[in-house]
Image (cartoon, rainbow, N blue to C red):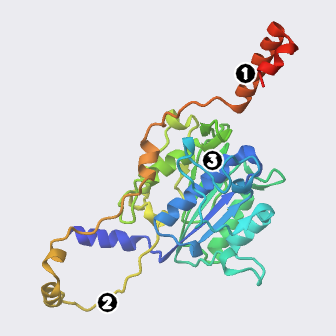
Amino acid sequence: MLWRDQAEQFFRSGHTNNWAVLVCTSRFWFNYRHVANTLSVYRSVKRLGIPDSHIVLMLADDMACNPRNPKPATVFSHKNMELNVYGDDVEVDYRSYEVTVENFLRVLTGRIPPSTPRSKRLLSDDRSNILIYMTGHGGNGFLKFQDSEEITNVELADAFEQMWQKRRYNELLFIIDTCQGASMYERFYSPNIMALASSQVGEDSLSHQPDLGIGVHLMDRYTFYVLEFLEEIHPASQTNMNDLFQVCPKSLCVSTPGHRTDLFQRDPQNVLITDFFGSVRKVEITTETISLDRDLAGFESKLPKDELAAEPLKYAEQLPVAQIIHQKPKQKDWHPPGGFILGLWALIIMVFFKTYGIKHMKHVF
């Protein structure tokens, strides 16, 4: 039966809670897109049900307060400044110079000082499904942190092994958007890890969405198309990981995205997107048979007729984001820049002087 198949699918993953570790490793204004990448993923996992208490957000730079930002207290991920992903509900756990290789590894392995607040801890267990998203500048076998240090693929693989030995995860999804990203998962050897990367070894990951008003690119191509895919997902979606593997072909990303599933025990076709991007709903399991017909009939008799005729509840449309992603850029009215107007006035005055001389200045003022 259909409901029985859905129940088996629900319990097949074996996890009881979800966590997300989202890391932007870049500093400086020209890396604006990396902050937007991370905040966009943060927004998506919160929309799908993972609370802030189960998200560790690490941002190496605060683009919202950067002096070059024409719109202070905002970070946009789409052209024409139409989608602000930096709002009042963003809780950054590690910021600025707290985003280091050491702190990142300590968060993963749980080797943090006792004084560390709960919000900066990854309190996962052997029933936790963990999403780890990283973005920044990298190369063959390394990812840079703030242009001052780097983490290697060997260090990352050993950290995941420590997590497995300490029973800190049930299944782990690793996503990285950086140049030569596939090199970062080559050394993984721990069980139940699925990995995705934006580019193969020897390839660059390219930026996307240039904005003339802000002066930089707003996102990276791979993350942009992944988030476009996630906007179609709702908490009850049956979309699986195989669909995620296909979201950014080379014709769109220019680079060649990669994935690795040999360490993962389940078939990706049986792994729901919400197993990592969503949260587990609490249920109470009983072996007793409970009859709901009698109580349900009595309950319906007490309800007004207009409530009985109401349409079943549906998930709210994610507006205006769903429209923003697919719509064409708006045509904006053209206004001459301030420098152009000043230059025009200067030209008019020079022509006046040359034609009439200074004795006619009184006619100007």
* Earlier residue among tags 1 and 3: 3
Q: Is residue 206 rendered to the left or right of residue 44?
A: right
> Which residue sits at x=37%, y=58%?
317
The residue carrying mark 3 is: 182
Nearer to us: label 1 or label 2: 1
Residue that lies at the very extreme toward the top in this rendered image: 355
Q: How crowded is mark 1: few (under 14 residues within 10 Å), some or many (20 or more)?
A: few
Q: Which of 286 and 36 is in front in this view?
A: 36
Split into 4 quadrants, where in the image is the N terminus? bottom left
Residue 332 in the image: state x and y as whole percent.
52, 34
Q: What element carries label 1?
A: helix
Tally the numbered discs.
3
> Which residue sits at x=74%, y=29%?
339
Q: Is residue 279 rendered to the left or right of residue 257?
A: left
Is 333 located above or below residue 274 in the figure? Answer: above
> Which residue sits at x=62%, y=44%?
218
Q: Nearer the viewer, residue 261 or 1?
A: 1
Residue 189 in the image: state x and y as whole percent.
63, 61
Q: Nearer the viewer, residue 224 or 310?
A: 310
Residue 268 in the image: state x and y as whole percent.
44, 57
Label 2 – label 3 distance at C-alpha: 45 Å
The residue carrying mark 1 is: 344
Q: Is mark 2 on a helix, strand or loop?
A: loop
Name which residue type carries label 2: Thr
Asked which quadrant contains residue 97, the reply is bottom right
| Image disc number at residue 286 | 2
Asked which quadrant contains residue 163, the reply is bottom right
Q: Is mark 3 on a helix, strand or loop?
A: helix
Residue 181 in the image: state x and y as whole percent.
65, 47
